[in-house]
Amino acid sequence: MDFEAYLAPYAATSSHSRGRRYAEPASTSRTEFQRDRDRIVHCGAFRRLEYKTQVFVNHEGDLFRTRLTHSIEVAQIARSIARNLGLNEDLVEAISLAHDLGHTPFGHAGQDALHVCMKEYGGFEHNLQSLRVVDMLEQRYGGFDGLNLMFETREGILKHCTAAHAAELGDIGKRFLEKKQPTLEAQLANLADEIAYNNHDIDDGLRSGLLTVEQLETIDFFARHKREAEAAFPGIGGRRAINETVRRMINALIIDLIDTSRERIRASGVQTVEEVRIAGPLIAFSDSMRSEALLLKRFLRKNLYQHYQVNRMTSKARRVVTELFHIFMEEPALLPPSYQTARDAGIDDTQHTAVQARSVSDYIAGMTDRYAMREHRRLFAIEET
């Protein structure tokens, strides 16, 4: 079956891809982007997302989102939108499933702490780490390190990048230096991520008791869709009312994104991926919807992400990550052998320390929440072994 025949002319395709870093025979049963998706789903870093924080640390409750369930929700939303726009569903799914592979334990608190620790060694950024995971750290194949993903999948994973890092990355970082855009599929995965986390954080915030419906009703976007749910189902209440409200919010965002993006693509006149790259962002919300989404994001930052109970957990998380980093740097013999870097006669002490620091950050970033806490107890609690 010719899957590419059903795509819009500006969609990314395997036949016009920039390919893989290491040449491989083509599959007879799957597209190249399907192969990427399958490699991501089967890798160890993807499985570990099950026990990595979204907002709430994994042990705080079984029903809260994790990085894994978040990634699946992003992929579902992105595929739905891609189909409506004639874009490559397999590529957008692969990007969506891989976009958080480099995230540390304990969510953004862990990332921020590791960035501070790594500041003098180039810093830490989870998008760069996600690319590092698929390019180097996964070791599943005999012929190469990493997963050897297609160029377009890799560039979609790398959502953000400083000019300094971009210059070090070669072809994959060039678009940041040239001020060009990635594929429409990559642009779409980025906004599907936003749709997913804003809305499921509302759901988790209410479920945890850290947010109340009364608070959320001060946000017109929530209040309006709650009224719609109540009008459609008189007498509805409890979890059912919340679910109906959030479902409507997600649908409104998706429809707006489809309609706005379709019009922007049409007005731009793009007909190829190369034209997409120089056209400016084409996947976007309307101005009014962007304003509503921004108000919702600000509300969540103030009332959920900075809630004192969340702050207590993130404070502990920062200490765990920071203390692990420093003890491994001071005593690298405590690291598993695969993360201990041998001293190369060709580099000086400063260079060796930087290499060791990056290896320590790889180890910590790959930890799940519960593994990081267990490692911390092993190293700092006298009764642990």
Image: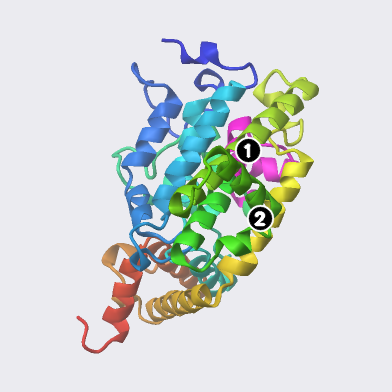
- Indicate whether residue 321 is drawn in magenta: no
User: The disc labelled 2 sits on which kind of residue?
Assistant: Leu
Q: Mark 2 — residue?
A: 296
Q: Mark 1 — residue?
A: 252
Q: Nearer the viewer, residue 202 or 117?
A: 202
- Give percent across and percent down for residue 362: 42, 62
Residue 187 location, quadrant? top right
Determine whether 98 is above or below 52 in the image. Answer: above
Residue, x 45% and y 61% (percent of image)?
Answer: 207
Left or right, 1 with reference to 5: left
Determine whether 273 is above or below 53 in the image. Answer: above
Residue, x 58% and y 32% (percent of image)?
Answer: 185
Magenta segment, which residues? 166-192
Q: CA distance from mark 1 to mark 2?
A: 14 Å
Left or right, 266 with reference to 107: right
Dominant secondary structure of the residues highlighted in magenta in the image: helix
